[in-house]
Each structure stands twice: as C-alpha cells, then as structure tokens.
Image (cartoon, rainbow, N blue to C red):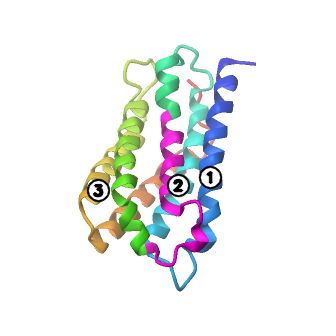
Amino acid sequence: MTLFEFLSVVFSLVLALGVSRGLNGVRSAYMLNRRYWPHAIWLFNKLLNAVTYWWWLWSYSEAKDYWNLFNFFLALMIPVILYLQMDSLVTHRPREVTNWKAHYYSEHRWFFGFNAVQAALACYILSNFGNPMPAHVLGVLWALITLILSVVCYKSEQHKTHMVAAVVVGSGQVLFLISNMQVPNAA
C-alpha cells in the first residue's frame, strides 16, 4: 500500500460522510412547496464539490514529496469543512424543516464562514505553494472568486446576492470539473 492509498482512505471516509449528510436532505430541500433556490443550489454545489475534490485529489497520487503531516492536515480540512457545511445546510432532521429560506439565513454565517476558509485552503493547495507541482491556475481563480463571494454572502441577507453567488460558484466548479474530466495528471 502506498502512502497516498493509505491517506486517501481517510479522505474518502470523510467525504462519504459529508455526501451522505447532503443526500439525506436532498428530497426535502427540493420539495416544491418548501424549496428556496439559493439553498437548493448551494446543496447541489456542495455535493458536486465533494465529487470534484475526490476526483482532483488523484493528481497528488504520485506526489511522494508533497505528503507530510502539514499538507495532509490541510488537504483533510477541506472534506471536514464540507461535512460541517452539509450539516448546516440540511440539519439532522431535514424533513422537519418547513421553511428552507428561514433555515438558510439562520445558518448562512456559519456556512459562508466555512466556505471562505475552504476556498482559502483550496487556493493555497491548488497554487502548490512550496511544492514542485505546477499551480492549477483555473482552480486558483475559482477558489479566489469563491472566497470573495463567500465573504459577500457572509455579510449579506439579500436574495439576489445569494442567488448570483450560488450560480457563479456552481458554474465555476462545473468549469473546473470539465477541465479535469480526464484522469488528473499525477505529479
């Protein structure tokens, strides 16, 4: 077993917990009579975020010089934050939420605070600062835009602001995923 295979087990477990938490609330969050679009789009974005991160992580499979305790911790923080965000989006009892808009705005500071931290971590990791791997320019750009929009949404409770941010971040993530459709290059 390689070091990456050993480490990827932990990443996969934490990502699976987050995806499970998110999927648990999808049906309830997308019900016609209760749906709030910014919340629904962010839930979709975060589920896609887990898939994107898991797929992109393969690019570090051969980077033996990259993995140390610090980089492992940083890389692990992204799925941990993702789990916490999923938990804030759908709660432990999503079927009991009757108003997703009220729930969304009661949790938005928690969610976007963590989203800003996650975007900053992604920016640092994707830039490969201090590592021999080349930076992923599109990924760094997407992370910077996400960081800026997360700070804006943290401060705002305007529907249009949250809707635009959800669509822009989701679109950027889809572009990032499309740019990495093939098996990511291992370093």
> Residue at image x 41%, y 26%?
128
Q: Is residue 19 above or below residue 73?
A: below
Q: Amino acid at mark 2?
A: Met
- The mark nearer the N terminus, 2 or 1, is 1
Give the residues in magenta. Answer: 77-100
- 62 or 2, nearer to the observer: 2
**Residue 131, above or below 26:** above
Q: Is residue 184 above or below residue 33?
A: above
Q: Which residue is mark 3?
A: 154
Q: Which residue is mark 1?
A: 19
Query: CB under 8 Å between callouts 3 and 2?
Result: no
Give SS at disc 2.
Answer: helix
The kind of residue on which mark 3 rests is Tyr
Residue 120 is tagged as: none
Question: Are discs 3 and 1 less than 8 Å apart at CB?
Answer: no
The image position of residue 165, as x and y in percent, is 34, 62
Residue type at mark 1: give it: Val
Q: What is the number of the mark on residue 86?
A: 2
Image location of residue 154, percent across then percent down: 29, 56
